[in-house]
Amino acid sequence: MLNRRTILSSFAAAGLLGAAAACSPSSDDGSGSGGGSSASDAGGSSGGDKGTLTFRLWDENAVAAYQESFEAFTAESGWNVEIDVVPWGDYWTRLPLDVASGDAADVYWMNSANYVQFKDSDALVDINEIIPDGASQWEKSVVDLYTRDGGLWGVPQIWDSIAVFYNKDLVEEAGVDPSDLVFDPSAETDSLRDAARALTVDGAGLHPGEDGFDVDSREQFGFNSQADRQAIIGPMLASNGATWQADDEYTFASPEGIEAFQYMADLINVENVSPSAADTNENGDYSRDLFTQGKLGLFQSGPYNLLAISEGVADSFEWALAGPVEGSEGAKSLVHGVVAVGNAQADDDQQEGINALLTWLGSKEGQLPLAEQGVSFPGHVEAQDAFIAFWEEKGVDVSVFVDAAKNPAEADTGARANAGLGAAIPIFQEVFIGRLSAEDGIPQAQEEGNAAMAE
C-alpha cells in the first residue's frame, strides 16, 4: 500500500486534467457540469438503519435520477446514501487529496482517462470480486475501457458513442444521403466530400469549386471537421486503419494516421466545407451552435449533445441521426463511459455497504432512473431501451448510438493519459488550422505526447 505522501506525489505528477469525460450530459464542452467552485450536498436517501454511505459525482443533472435510485436502494438494503456534487472544475483537484487523506467518498464517479492512477494507488475496489457476473450485464465497450491487470475497476453508469446529426431540410435540398458518408484520402473525391460541398454555400449561393465561390462569405457549412478527439479524430483515425496507442504509448503517427489527419485538415483549408479552425479551436461548441442555427448540414458528435440540440433547434427544422462517417475499416465510434468506483480504503463495516451500493448501481433497477429521466445511455444493457424510449417520445431515434458502440475506436487510457493528450492536442490544432502539415505535426504530437506520458 502506498503511503499518503506517495499517493499525493503520484497524483500531482499525473496532471489529472480529466480530458475524457464527454458523456456528461449537462456539459456544453463534454466535460461535465462546471461553473461552481465548491461541493454541494444534493440530498440522497434516508430512513435506513444500517448507516450512511456517501456518493460523489460531478454532474448536477444526474442528481434527481440518483435520488430516485437511492430511495429504492435504502428501502431494500437499509443503507442511507448522501449525494455530494463536486463541480468538474474542482473534481480532479479535490479527489486525489481526499483519497490521500482518507476522506474520499464511499462510492464516486470516475472516467477512463483517470482511473488507472487511482487503481495503481490501491484506492479502488475490484468489481469482479464483488459482482462476478457483472461484466456480462453491462455495455461491453465500457467494461473493456475499465478492465486492466485482470480486474474491473468500476461499475458502468453512463456512456456515449458517436453518430451524425443531420438537418433534414438541408440534406434533402442538397440531395445528400446521410446514411452513405464514406471518406477515402487516397481518392480524388468521395461521398463525404461530395456531400459536404453540396451542403456548403456562400453568400451568393455558390458551392466550393464553383467559379466565384467566396470562402469568406460562407453562410452554410457541410461537415464539422475539427480538432475534437472524441467525435472526429478518434473515429476517423480508426476508420482509416490507424491505431491510437499501444499499451501506454501513442502510435497515431503511422502513415494511415498522418493521411487521416491531413484529410481532416483539408476539409477545412482545401475543400472549404468545414468551419475555420480559428473558430473551432477556440470554441469546441462552435460547430454545434452552427447546427442548431441551421447553418451546418452534418454534425458528427455524441449523445452528450442531444439535449442541447433538441432545445437549441426547437421547432426551427427537423433533424435526425445516422451512423458515423465510414473509412476503409468501416464506421468506428469512440466510446466513453463513466463508472462508479468503490473506495477500497474504507473500514470493514463501511465496505459492506459500499459493496451493496456498487451492486445496486450495477443492476437494471438501480440504473433505470438514469435512462427514464433522459440523463444518458445507462451502462446496464437491459436499461437502455428506457433511454431510447425517452427520445422516441421526442421524435428522435437514438438507437444508432447503440449500433455505433459495437465497433469502437481506441479511447485514452493509462496512468498519464491526460498529460499525453494535453501535450498532443495543441499540435493537432496547429494541423487543423493549417500552420503545420500532418506530415510534420503529427509525429511531433506523438513524440511530445509520449514524452509527457513517460514523465
Image (cartoon, rainbow, N blue to C red):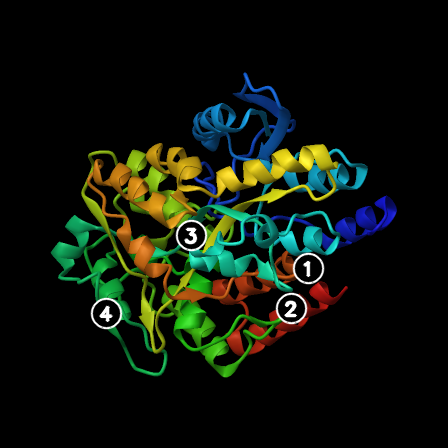
Pointer 1 with pointer 3, Cβ within 8 A = no
| Residue found at x 53% / y 70% | 244
* Number of the front mark, 1 or 3: 3
* Number of the front mark, 3 or 4: 3
User: Which residue is the extreme one toward the top?
Assistant: 47
C-alpha gap between disc 4 and disc 2: 38 Å
| Amino acid of disc 4 | Asp
Answer with mark 4 or mark 2, whichever residue precedes in sequence: 4
Where 184 sits versus 367, above or below? Answer: below
Q: Nearer the viewer, residue 70 or 29?
A: 70
Q: Position of residue 143 (x, y in %)?
A: 50, 57
- The residue under label 2 is 248
Left or right of 393: which side holds 428?
A: right
C-alpha gap between disc 4 and disc 1: 40 Å
Answer with mark 3 or mark 2, whichever residue precedes in sequence: 3
Task: Indicate the secondary structure of the residue bearing disc 3.
Answer: helix
| Amino acid of disc 2 | Asp
- The residue under label 1 is 416
Asked if one can make out residue 278 in the rendered structure from this viewpoint, the answer is no
Q: Nearer the viewer, residue 453 or 390?
A: 390
Answer with mark 1 or mark 3, whichever residue precedes in sequence: 3
* Number of the front mark, 3 or 2: 3
- Quarter assignment of residue 370: top left
Q: Position of residue 443 (x, y in %)?
A: 60, 76
Answer with mark 4 or mark 1, whichever residue precedes in sequence: 4
- The residue under label 3 is 137
- The residue under label 4 is 194
